[in-house]
Structure formats: structure tokens, C-alpha cells
Image: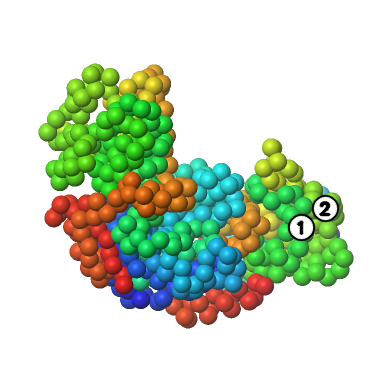
Amino acid sequence: MKTLRRDPLVRGLGLASAALGIPQVAKPADVARGIGVAAGPRQRTATVAVGVRELTAAAGLLARPHPVWLWGRVGGDVVDLALLTRTLRRHDGRGLGRTALATAAVAALTAVDVYTAVTRTGRGSETTLTATTTVSNPPEEAYAYWRRLEGLPTFMAHLEEVRRTGATTSHWRASAPFGRTVEWDAEVTEDVPGSVLAWRSLDGADIDNRGEVRFSPAPGGSGTEVHVTLRYALPAGALGRAVARYFGEEPSQQLDDDLRRFKQAVETGEVVRSEGAPAGKRARGEFPQHPARPLTSKELRKLTKLKETLS
Amino acid sequence: MKATCWMGPDSVSVKDVPDPSVLNGRDAVVRITSTAICGSDLHLVDGYVPGMQKGDILGHEFMGEVVEVGAGVDRSKIRVGDRVVVPFPIACGACAACRARLYSCCENSNPNAGLAEKVFGHPTAGIYGYSHLTGGFAGGQAEYARVPFADVNPLVVESDLDDEQLLFLSDVLPTGYMAAEMCDITDGDVVAVWGAGAVGQFAMDSARMLGAAKVIAIDKEPYRLDMAASQGYETIDFETVDVRSALLDMTGGRGPDKCVDAVGLEATHGSPHVDFYDRAKQAVRAESDRPHALRQAITSCRSGGVVSVVGVYGGLVDKFPVGAWMNRSLTLRAGQCHVHRYMKPLLERIERGEIDPTRVITHRMPLAEAPKGYELFKNKRENCEKIVLSAR
């Protein structure tokens, strides 16, 4: 997992903080004049205060990087924008252009800060999903169905493609919220036929993730319990999760549905479709569904195309 | 093809829709010859079942001829040209529920199981034409229907019995039979049946067949009570007498040994203020179902007796007589019918003349007149008990 310490954007913001903070503390009057503000005692004090804040942020971001410093920068930006707006409104006209330019620069920096804070928050804090089902097949069969990784997209809603790239490696492509696509290479880390299969993404993944499926005989010889654990680092962590949930992407529910379809496929040989949910694995995303009446030939052609891309 | 479509609450019309085709490898397409309107279809039309969408094809009681089978269908079980009766719950035949012969609880046949689980705790089987909660499968009040898991579900019929004798094997006859079977009837039992619709009538026939000494029908429609009386069953009109007192009177104060609820969530009550109470709660969504028949069955049943529920319930009820149930050691049994279990044995009973399913048919009409049929059935006009639609 990429650490914040080596994150170029985080380091860049730390250095930028230092570059801004040093002149603000050392030569507050020059800085104030430079942005077209009168260099009276109040303005100098404010400039020094802003400089101290910048240096604190710089020290934090460079020495002990943590998302809280990034959010601190966002807060500072809001204060700066408020100060500048107030100055602009009461401006006497001398150096107005420079003040406007400074405001625009701070606004641009704010955008970078917000982006960095949002995307870096939660990195390193993994989301863990678990789901379980019981299938009537023996453990070896259930395992074998899962081991053929290329087949996973037939029942896992978000997977678009899994391609074998080596004896233990594969390339995965999945759809992500807001119409994005994420890809990663993965390797199998544990493989005990009929019992356990585990994998993890390799360096350079769009989303760092790992997964594990355990197969154990159900009580009384009545089939196989399948326990799935997925761990992944969502961009934007908790915030991203909340936003995704708001737009109807509830990850744990999706994994439950994935497993339900796994059960359909391994027990009956196919993922069940209905007129209302003709695309099978996308049933939940289809509400309101297609009416419960046969599909037109045009709708069927679209569906066939979709099936082809899956197989 | 022509199909009966749900166009909104209280709105049914026959529309031109595309013909069905094989969607999954184990599907068959059936050309429908006969189909029926079920009492539970009225729950959909009356708007009590969530998850209906405009344009959904209704109907879950149908039979016909196989015209197409998918590549994955086991052809030793079913072939093109076979005459079939299709059970209303869709079973996969492979999951734990199907293996335990709990076909209406199939774990695989409902693609919207995640939704059903929210309401029921665990998912239930897909059902034709019965809302998207049960899968969004197109129904059978149409000229053709797609039948999933064709090598598991339909009963292939070789006998030369006509459609009317076979059609009800799809739902109402096995449902009535299962209601009686769940009662564990022993010789000499008195069995009371709430609801004298088709399911209730078949529950009464089955109760007698399984050894009941006395069968009592409870309803408010004189023609339905007459239909029961014509078979030798005693009757109670709940609009004119108090049901519990009447039952005590007819059983020497013991109460019926076994009770069947063949009414479900849209029950009415003889006493207007009780009826109003539940209608009001239902209207403001404080309960989804009106359980008058169930409450009465529980309070009327003798201690240690069985209350068997096949009337359809969908959600939550108010004032469930939990004290009567618990303190008097009642057994409550219920279920959507596991039709597949009963089709063959009941077909044999029909062939031997032990049951005549046609006795409940009061109306026969072409598929195109389905909306009129719904209107007659819903408003209990023209003594309407059971409508068979011909799709030929």
C-alpha cells in the first residue's frame, strides 16, 4: 500500500506550505504589499498568523503525514478565502489586480487541497466485507467453480472481466461507482483444493484489495459452507463509502447477491433470469425493473450482446 | 401474443406483447391452452402486494403444450409436444429447500431474492405473474409462457383427461389439499375452513378424504356456502351469526379440532367496527394485512389443535392472538403450497374419481375477456367462484 509519506501530491502540498509560510513569517509587510494589501499592523499580524499556520501544516505533512493535516489545509484555505474576499470588498483600488490574482490562486489551491484530502482520507483503512452461503455441492465442486477465476464475472455483479495471465496471476477489471472502471493484477496467495482460495492485488492496483474464500463441509454432510471475505481500500474511505451508499451501492448487500448467484450457478448450472431481471446479475441495479413480460427482439439482441461480453 | 397485464391497482387489460423465448438454457416455452384467475390474483389487483409494475403479465395457474425447450433441458424429462400442467412456484430442484421438498421456498429461483429477504427474512421461490418480489416472472394468463427449470417443474400428463380436470393441479387443488394435510387429521376430527373459495372448497374435500368426521365452511357469500352445503358440509355465515358461538354450538363446546385459514390478508369481519379498525390501520400502512380469519381460527380452535394457513399473507399484522396460541398449545402451520409434491398423487385421485376439480368452475371465457372475469370475481357477481380462461 502506497504511504502518504511517498505520495507526491502530499509531499508537494507540504513543500508548498513551507514556501508560502516562510516569507509570510519572515517578511509579512512585503508579502502583504505583494498581494496588493495595505501593510498596516493588522494586516501584518494576520499575515504572520497565516504563515505560522502554513509552517505547521508543512511540518505535519512532511514529517508525520496524516489526512488530518490535509483537512487542516482545507480549513486554512476557507479562512484565507474569507479574508481575501473581505479585503476585495473593501479595496481602495491600489493593487486590486494583484489581490484578485492572489484570490484566484488560493481558490485553485483549495481545489487541489480538497481533492487530495478526499482521495487520501481512509487510505490504509481497509473495508472488510464478509458473506456466506451454503450450497448442496461437495466442497471440491464449489471450490473448482470458484477456482476458474475467468468465470467469476458471471455471478459477481461488479466484475467485468478476469483474465488469466500466468500460473498464479490474473488481470481483473471491475466497474466502480459513478461509471468508472478500475483494474488490477492479482496473484493467488493460498490455494488448497476443496478448502481455501485466497488472492491479493499486486502493486499498481487502482484499488488495493484481497480476498479469501473458505469451503467447509456443512453439518450432516448436507453440502458446503462457503465463507467469503473481501478486503479493499476504497478511495476516500468512509466518505466515499457514505457517498456510494447514498447512490444505492451498498457493498455488503452486493456481496450477498453475488454469493446468491454463485449458489444458483453452482447448484443449477445457470444464473437465474426473469423477464423483470433479464440480465440476471444486474437485477438489483435494474429497479424499476423491466415489466414482467417477454422481451422484444431488440431488447433480446441487447441482452445477447451483454452475455457475449461476459463470456 | 395476447396477455393479461396489470396496469395499476384495479386496472387489468389484455395487451399485445412479444412472444416469450428461451432466456435460460433450462427453459421451456409453453403454448397455453387453459389458465385460471386465482383469488390471490385479487391481492395484486387490489394493490396489496408491493413490487408490481405497470405491464406485468398476471397469472400463475396454467397448462398447455411444450413448443420449445432450451439446450440445457434434460430431454428424458420433457420434450416438445408434451402436454404439461405448470406448478405456480418455480423450483430449481437442486437447493436444500427443493431437496427437502419445500419447493415454494426454493433458494435459487427468485432473481430478486435480496428484496424478498428484506420482507420475509429469508428468500422464497419465484412465482409466475406475482410481483417483482417473487422474481418478476411473466405470468400465465397469456397465449404463451416461459417455464424455467423445465425438467424440474411441469407435470407431463399422458392421460386423456380434459383441461378442466387437470388445470387446478397447478395451484388451488394442491393448496387446498396441503391445507388439510397440515392439519394432521385423525378419524373423527371436526375441521373448520375459513373461506369457501376454490382453495377452501378443495381443503374441505381433502379434509373429508383424509378422515374428518365433520367439515364446517365459514364465509359470507350465500352461493359459496351453498356450494359447500351441496357437498354435505355444514356452513356458518359470518355476517349473520357470531362465528365462535356457532362453532362451539356445532362442536359440543369443544371448538373445531383443526382450523384452516383459506382467506388471507384481505379478510372481512362480520362486525363493522372490527372490520373498519383493520381497514383503517391498513389504509395508513400501520399493518399490511387484515387477519380476521386467522384471529378467529386461533381463538376458536380447541386446545392442542392445529391452525393451518394457506391464505396468503404478505407482511405484518396487528392484534395477533399470541396468548391464545401459546397458552392453549396450538400448532400453527403454514406455507405457499409445495405443489410439486402433490401433483402426481392428486392426478391419480382425479383419475380414480376421488376428487372432481371441475365442481368449483362457475365461469368459462376466452382469454380476451379476462378483465371482465376479474371484475366478476372481485365483486363476487354472478355467483362467481372460479373462472377458467381458454387461450386456444
Distance of mark 1 from mark 2, alpha carbons? 8 Å
Q: Residue furthest right?
A: A167
Q: Seen in the image, is A171 located left or right of residue B343?
A: right
Dot 1 falls on which chain? A
Q: Seen in the image, is A192 located left or right of residue B354?
A: right
Viewport quadrant of the N terminus of chain A: bottom right
Whether residue A257 is visible to the viewer of this picture, yes or no, is: yes
Residue B188 placed where, x, y %?
Answer: 32, 26
Whether residue B137 is visible to the viewer of this picture, yes or no, is: no
Dot 2 falls on which chain? A
Do badges 1 and 2 share one subunit? yes
Q: Secondary structure at mark 1?
A: helix
State the residue at coordinates (39%, 18%).
Answer: B327
Q: Seen in the image, is B264 located left or right of residue A159?
A: left
What residue is shown with label 1?
A144
Q: Secondary structure at mark 2?
A: loop
Packing grade of label 2 (10 A; few <14, some 14-19, many >=20) is some
Q: Nearer the viewer, residue B165 or A140?
A: B165
Q: Amino acid at mark 2?
A: Pro
Residue B139 placed where, x, y %?
Answer: 39, 63
Q: Quadrant of residue B240?
A: top left
What residue is shown with label 2?
A193
Packing grade of label 1 (10 A; few <14, some 14-19, many >=20) is some
Q: Are marks 1 and 2 in contact (CB under 8 Å)?
A: yes
Residue B251 placed where, x, y %?
Answer: 24, 22
Q: Seen in the image, is B373 located left or right of residue A259?
A: left
Q: Nearer the viewer, residue B171 or A154?
A: B171
